[in-house]
Amino acid sequence: MERTDMPEMAHAAAPCRRHGAIGVHSIDRFVFSVPDIDRAEHFYRAFGLDVKRVGQRLELFTFGHPHCWGHVHQDGEHKRLQYLRMGVYAEDWATLLARVDSVGAGAPAHPRGDGDGLWARCPDGLLVQLVVAPKVSPSVKSPKRPELPLPPGVGAAPARSQVSPVRPRHLSHVLLFTPDVPAQIAFMTSVLGLRLSDRSGDLIAFLHGAHGSDHHLVALARSGAPGLHHTSWDVASVDEVGGGGEQMRAAGYADGWGVGRHVLGSNYFQYVRDPWGSYAEYSFDIDFVPHDVDWQAGDHAPEDALYVWGPAVPADFTTNFEHSA
């Protein structure tokens, strides 16, 4: 098992934390690799992210926010999810370390990791890095863009030539493929301290952070192997969901799914397929679970678990191209 002692620079606990709960508070970073870093850079710049290139690695930011949400490396012939980095409070560190020890989940640091913190291996093999870090998941529901009143006789929609670029505000969640959804739920709740929001049998599950987060920080979908289905990014309006899809079509990325509205999480969505078969999602108005609210998790029929309205689901929407490659 490879780990470090609690980092010397401990961050102060955020005012919103659930009393008596120990668990990760944020997805601090997702890390995956692709065979063509230039194509990845074009995709994420078109999507509206602030992309910084460091050698053969992309660092993904949102404009106006200092946090780096993701790393994309150039490596191999296929896209591959490498690991997740999750943020924890300093005062939770010892308990989380003991939990990982108790189930024998400790693991060596990922070769592309910085070696910091504690490394754990999920039941499906996914590596998770735990680090003491500031909370970057939202602590309140993301605000909607205010609509200014218009005088009678004035159109509300802007001219197409005057539309501003869509720029997401922060990472909302990631959806991961896994061959055993119940085993992943058990690990992520009992060891990492996430909480079940909703599920549909053993097909899909949604988990939120105990210290306040969107309806899900992590979602899990059944597949033959681990992998990354999509990253989801918060925007400020339904117009930005639709406008993001239009922005990506103009950039050459016409494949995807949306505009529509989910059932579980309630958010409006537009998925855009990247060059390797996974997705980036524009998301607006997702349900929020405050730190002091007990969300009543449900087990929903498949037909009631995906969307309320929208276009037909693409036939290969749930294909794990990392596994099929």
Image (tube, rainbow, N blue to C red):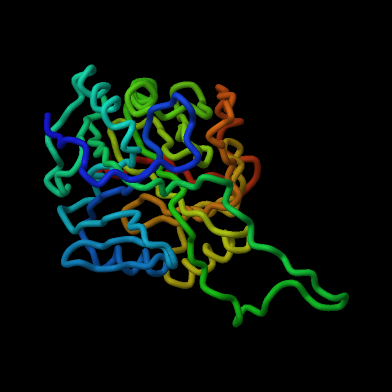
Residue at the image point whose x is 23% and y is 64% from the top: 37
Q: Quadrant of residue 156?
A: bottom right
Residue at the image point whose x is 56% and y is 75% from the top: 164
Q: How many marks?
A: 0
| Residue 312 placement (x, y as % from top left) | 57, 46
Front one among 188 and 42: 188
Residue at the image point whose x is 41% and y is 33% from the top: 221
The residue lying furthest to the right in this view is 152
Quarter holding the C terminus is top left
Q: Is residue 256 above or below residue 324?
A: below
Quarter holding the N terminus is top left
Residue at the image point whose x is 33% and y is 42% from the top: 87
| Residue 75 placement (x, y as % from top left) | 16, 55
Q: Quadrant of residue 290?
A: top right
| Residue 73 placement (x, y as % from top left) | 21, 57
Q: Is residue 273 above or below residue 129?
A: below
Q: Is residue 12 above or below residue 56?
A: above
